[in-house]
Each structure stands twice: as C-alpha cells, then as structure tokens.
Amino acid sequence: MGSSFSDRLADAVRRTRTPLVVGIDPRADRLPHSLLPQEAYDDHAAVAEAYATFGEAIVEIAAGRVCAVKPQLAFFEECGPAGATALARVAKAAREQGLLVIFDGKRSDIDSTAEGYARAYLGAKSAWGADALTVSPYLGGDSLDPFERVAVEQDAGLFVLVKTSNPGGKMFQDLQLGERRLFEHVAAYVEERAKATAGACGYGVMGAVVGATYPAQLEQLRREMPSAWFLIPGFGAQGGAAKEIVPAWDGQGLGGVVNSSRKIIFAYRDAPYAAKFGEANWKGAVSAAIDEARAAFASAHAAFSA
Amino acid sequence: MGSSFSDRLADAVRRTRTPLVVGIDPRADRLPHSLLPQEAYDDHAAVAEAYATFGEAIVEIAAGRVCAVKPQLAFFEECGPAGATALARVAKAAREQGLLVIFDGKRSDIDSTAEGYARAYLGAKSAWGADALTVSPYLGGDSLDPFERVAVEQDAGLFVLVKTSNPGGKMFQDLQLGERRLFEHVAAYVEERAKATAGACGYGVMGAVVGATYPAQLEQLRREMPSAWFLIPGFGAQGGAAKEIVPAWDGQGLGGVVNSSRKIIFAYRDAPYAAKFGEANWKGAVSAAIDEARAAFASAHAAFSA
C-alpha cells in the first residue's frame, strides 16, 4: 500500500507551497496556431494530437510548481477515440513529472457501472491511472459507495459535486429541503464518508467540489465538512479571488486546492500576457500566469509564501 | 435538417413494434470464454477487442428487432483508449444496422465544457455519432442548456436523470421541498424543455430517465411530463415487469422505451437459456431473450403485438 490520495495531496501542497491546480481544458480555437492551424479544427485526429502536445507542454511547465493538474475529459472526448489516446498521453506525462492527476469527468452511475467508472480511472493500476476523479451525487449514496470502495483500495481520491459556481447551480442545489438545502444534505454525506476515511493529514478519500464564487458558502461548508478536501473551481476566468478562498484552508494551508484553467493555459491570449509574450511565446505566458496565481495565494495565506 | 430524435425514436418504436432497448454493458468476466479467455481479463487491449466483437454481434442480432441500443460508456472507458476504439466500432455497427444509439454516459458540466460533451456525442457529425445521451441534472438548468442547444441543432436527444431505480436513489431525489420532492423539481424542468422542443410525435428533445422499480412514480411522472420520452432502466435484471411500465405509454405505445441489459446480452448464463443454449450458442440465447422481452411488452400493450 502506498499513501492515501489525501496524504499525497497534502504532501504536494506542502512541497510546492501552493494550492494551485492547473486545469487542462484544451479548445481547438484557442490553441496557438503553431500547434493547430485553423483548417484542421474539424479533423479529430489532428485536434487530438495538438491537445496531447499542448497538454504535455503544460505539464512540463507546471511540474514542481503546482500540486496537481486537472484534465477536463469533455474536450478530449470531443475528439473521439483519438482524444482518448491524447488524454492518456497527458496523464502519463503528468505522472512522470510527479504531478497528481485529477480527472474532471463528473461521473456517476450505480452498482457495477459505478464500479466500472471507478476501476477505469482510479489508481496507478487502472487504465487511465488518475489519482482522483470528480463525481456527481444525484444518484445517491449507494451510487458513490463503489467509487469510495475502489478509491480506498487503490489509494485514490474523489471530489463530489456539492456546490458549483455556475449561476444556475442554485436551481436544484439551493432548494430548501427541511432545514437544509440540497447541497447541505450532500455536504453532510460527504463529510461522513471523508471522516470515516481520513488519512494522516486529517482529510479523507471523499472530497467536495465547492464553487469559489460563493465565499460565504465556502466558509459554511468548511465548517460542515472539516474532513473533506475541497476542489475549488472558478478561480481566474470565473472571477473568484485568492482572498475569498482563505476560509477553505486550515492553519497549514491544507484542505482546499484551487483550479485555474483558461487564465493559465490560454494566458497568451489575455492582457497583460498577450502584449508581453504573444502567441509565439505562449509557454512563457503560461509560466508567468502560474507565477501570478502562486503569488496571489502566497499573499492570501502564509503557508504559501516562499 | 433530418427529422428530430424524438420523431426518429417514435418511428423506430412503430417500425419494430417494441419499446425494447438493448443495453450493451460488456463485462470481461461475463463474456463467453470463446471471446475472451480468463487469462486476458487484465489485458485492456484484449478486453476492448472482445467488447467490440461482442457488441457488434449483439447489434447484428438486435437489428430490426429493437428500437435502439444503449452502450454503457463506463465499461468501455475501463479499457482505456482501446475501449474508446471499441465503443466507436459498436456505435458504427449499430448505425449501419439502422439502430438508434443512446449513449449512457450520464454526463454533466457547465458552459463550454457541457457543450464539449454535447458536441462529442450528439449527432451524426460528432466524433461518436450517437443519437442521444444520458445527462445528470445536479448542476442546474444552465448546465443542461448547452446540451439542449446542440441536441436541437444536431437532431439528437437527451435523457435527464430524474428518478433512478437504485435503492439509494431516494437519498437526495426524494428529499421534500414544500409539496415537491427534488425529482419532481427536475421533472418540471424537463417537461418545460421537452414541451418547448416537441416534434411531430408530441415528444421533445429532452427526455427523462425514470426507474421502473417505482411504478406508482412512473404513472405520476407520465402525468407531470407528458412531452418527455422516458428511458426506463431496471427491466429484467433489476426486477421491473412489463405490465408495470404500461403507465409510461400513450395509446400508440409511444412515450417510453425500456432498457434491458444483462438479462439479454448475458442470457446464456441464466435459466432457462443456460440449459437450452449454453455458452457455445450464446448468440441464440441473446436472440431468444430478445423474443421473450418483446413478447412481454406485446402482452402488456396492443401497440406491440405482432
């Protein structure tokens, strides 16, 4: 047995001194043209090859400077079978660089099918070799059991959707059910399972996806889920700011990792990087954007200072 | 523009005179040994190849006798990139045989990521070429909008998880808000979108996954979602019976398609098929199990009689 995902994530945050996770969300029409010319946007094989090359480059730039990468499965799946090969290449490159790999697939199903997804993705022995996977709770606790069982067995982790950062997330998640809203019911379940599987770091196998555009709820959910790692999307392109994430962290800066995708991987397209680096030096822009995000977290919490 | 998915599904039910959907849920340890010897269970490429061969055979047997097939993505994903190639082969074979293809992936995400999933799977021009996809509602209405937009554009369909057949499904789905439970809120949303996109058959782009182990709820949900196609799992291996599904159907036998997976594709392992056909004639067992399911629906609704 290796160490648990929760402990490996704690180690990675301590070692890299940042909660930053780089989201690998490739998009054909945002890639540097040197990787993919416009006339190839409809060619699934060409797009997949460009995604693999792009993802591998992101991994190389991010290695040692972020705690994990989070490939977004949708964009790879959009390329068909060629995209699967590209995703496997990116995941392999990340593992080889010592980065934890969180697959953002928001999977869910029941019984043996849920176990199928868990066995597909979780752990070094699985076909994909991810360290963790995002999952959706609508199907109930027994749909999450197989994921938890496999995660424990394979020293892998899970992040359950609890409170999401999209404007419409409240449509169902904020429905008031008894004295609690739906997302609070889900949070109670996640905390129960996280506590039952807590590692040396104090956090368990089951974590939570908690949108950073709701800082008050981040504080509340931290109180309600003291044993759960948070995966916090919405930093950067969706408008969250580092200081609003402070409630997610414990005294050591553990407990919450923060994803940024577009603002980092496509930094060459945005001010001020567009002028400074331009498309030709898109890798320099990625690197500078990682530095900027790291600095934002360092100014928000002492654990992340150099 | 071709005809909408809802109308194509109505045509397929009329043409084949059955609501039967065969679920393609391959499992290494249940395949006939002639397709996959036990020593190859851990060889992803060998398993994927066997899944493709098995799926293509199921499609050939089912062609013209069921309205659709529903590959379960989890089991293909379990094989890694080789599984993606296998899934594409099965989907292609189904299309070529004139079967509608419903991908059971229970996908969900927001914004451009949701659109990525939709563009990956929906419609003849997508990389996977599915006619429809199952999706999960937890992220709210704005997470389903991109799926709906692409489905309308590509003449494809969606089935939103509303009420599922697993024992733990009620954990969140049955939570009470005032006079409505969570699944009823989701149902109201699905009906609104189904009505807004209804085709000539009266049913819309957005359908609902409704578990058949709750017949009273099937009747209730039919009343509450008159414009939504139902995809009903849980027939066969999960214990639903044909007569309990009657409330799902309108006078023409439209409105609900019914999935059966294990009881059909692995029929050779179960009584009475095990004795009659055995592993060597596993295809004969599949064919007989399809006949038996068709007969069960025919005895339950006149529209399905020969």
Image (tube, coloured by chain):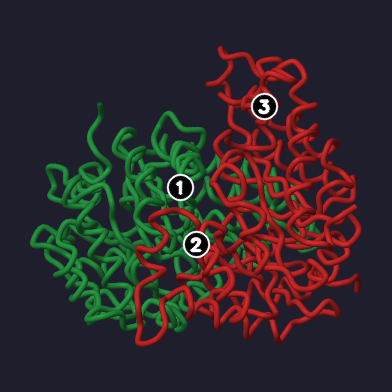
Chain colours: A green, B red
Asked if the residues shown at circle 2 and circle 1 are in contact, with their CB atoms under 8 angstroms apart, the answer is: no
Residue type (three-letter) at the residue carrying disc 1 = Val
Kindly state the secondary structure of the residue where label 2 is placed.
Answer: helix
Q: CA distance from mark 3 to mark 1?
A: 55 Å
Front position among marks 3 and 1: 3
- Left or right placement of residue B154 versus residue A289 in this view: right
Residue located at (51% from left, 70% from top): B137
Decide which of B303, B267 is in the foreground and name it. B303
Label 2: few (<14), some (14–19) or many (≥20) C-alpha neighbours in 10 Å: many
Q: Which residue is mark 1?
A: A59
- Left or right placement of residue A73 versus residue B60 in this view: left
Give the chain of mark 3.
B
Residue type (three-letter) at the residue carrying disc 3 = Pro
Q: CA distance from mark 2 to mark 3?
A: 58 Å
Q: Which residue is mark 2?
A: A265
Of labels 2 and 1, earlier in sequence is 1
Above or below, A66 relative to B77? below
Residue located at (24% from left, 73% from top): A245
Kindly state the secondary structure of the residue where label 3 is placed.
Answer: loop
Residue type (three-letter) at the residue carrying disc 2 = Ile
Front position among marks 2 and 3: 3
